[in-house]
Amino acid sequence: MMKPRVVVTRRWPAAVERILVERFDATLNTNDVPLGQDQIKAAFRDFDAILPTVSDKLPRDVFPDSDSRTRLIANYGVGFSHIDIDAARERDIVVTNTPGVLTDCTADIAMSLLLSVARRTGEGERQLRAGEWKGWCPTHMIGTKVSGKTLGIVGMGRIGKAMAQRAHFGFGMKIVFHNRSRVDDEETRAMGATQLATVEDVLAQADFVSLHCPGGAENRHLINASRLAAMKPGAFLINTARGDVVDEQALITALKDRLIAGAGLDVFAEEPKVPEALTRLENVVLLPHLGSATEETRVAMGMKAVDNLTAFFEGRTVPDRVV
Ligand code: DGY
């Protein structure tokens, strides 16, 4: 029997690529240059499955009107706002993602950003490396205490809860959160976390606001100028979700005007472009989308995609189907 033809849009961990090559007629991207829109269009004609990731864009106009050989898009990553899922649904193309395996590592990065921006570790390291540190003194580089403060979570899914657990059990933080549907489970109760009706309610109480909701049209610029103004004056914003959830220009203004105290960002609206104005600010910590970037997690993400592909082509129920 012919093996399904699959195309991988970027380099994946070597252990996963080996399995892909064994099980499928896999075309790998050995030089790791992102595919252009024309190459993605052509892939729908030539491959049974496309294995994209967050650095690809699959808007409606790359989907073929007819003659799609592709029946499965197995995304490497949990977020899939870079794929037009309505266009996939209309063509009966199944879309899968890789949830669960990146929860801890993404929450770890959110917590590191929170600690770094509050305790000014980026600034401190830059000063030291530049040879500008004049020595210890009682007024040097004073930050904000984290322990015991209030953390506001926007989007209390797997990663939001993992972040809340770190903050509550590790740092004694009080947890408030907003989530569109009601969250009432043992994990959330154990943290004494309080669900609030609106994002504004969270902003009014939180010393730190951490975003864990999906990207895409529904949450575009959820944090805009008026919501930044509604944050407490000494508060910090942490974003490990998607860049487009925050209006970056409004954030830059709020940071410059000290409407909020600082921000820790792992994601940006136009990755890998980062607004130059952000890079010039001291009260931000900026990371190059490292949320899931550990050996264990990146391999596990690949294995989830392999499981989805294998189940699909064996005619079994696909574990992580989003469409
Ligand atoms: C995710 O899984 O969504 C991460 O942001 C990396 O893609």
Image (cartoon, rainbow, N blue to C red):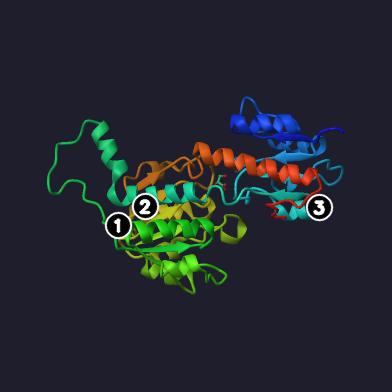
Amino acid type, label 2: Leu
Residues at discs 2 and 1 in contact (Cβ within 8 Å)? yes
Q: Quadrant of residue 254?
A: bottom left
- 127 left or right of 22 in image: left
- 307 left or right of 210 in image: right
Residue 210: percent from the left, percent from the top? 43, 58
The local secondary structure at tag 2 comes to: helix
Amino acid type, label 1: Val
Amino acid type, label 3: Asp
Q: Name the residue under label 2.
A: 114
- 195 left or right of 232 in image: right
- 147 left or right of 57 in image: left
* Mark 1 closeness class: few <14, some 14–19, many ≥20 residues within 10 Å: some
Q: Which mark is residue 122?
A: none
Q: Mark 3 points at which residue?
A: 92
Q: Which of marks 2 and 1 is nearer the N terminus?
A: 2
Q: Name the residue under label 1.
A: 146
Q: Earlier in the sequence, mark 1 or mark 3?
A: 3
Q: Nearer the viewer, residue 242 or 95?
A: 95
Q: Which of 282 and 48 is in front in this view?
A: 48
Q: Nearer the viewer, residue 63 or 213?
A: 213
Disc 3 and disc 2: Cα gap in Å?
A: 41 Å
Q: Earlier in the sequence, mark 3 or mark 2?
A: 3
* Mark 2 closeness class: few <14, some 14–19, many ≥20 residues within 10 Å: many
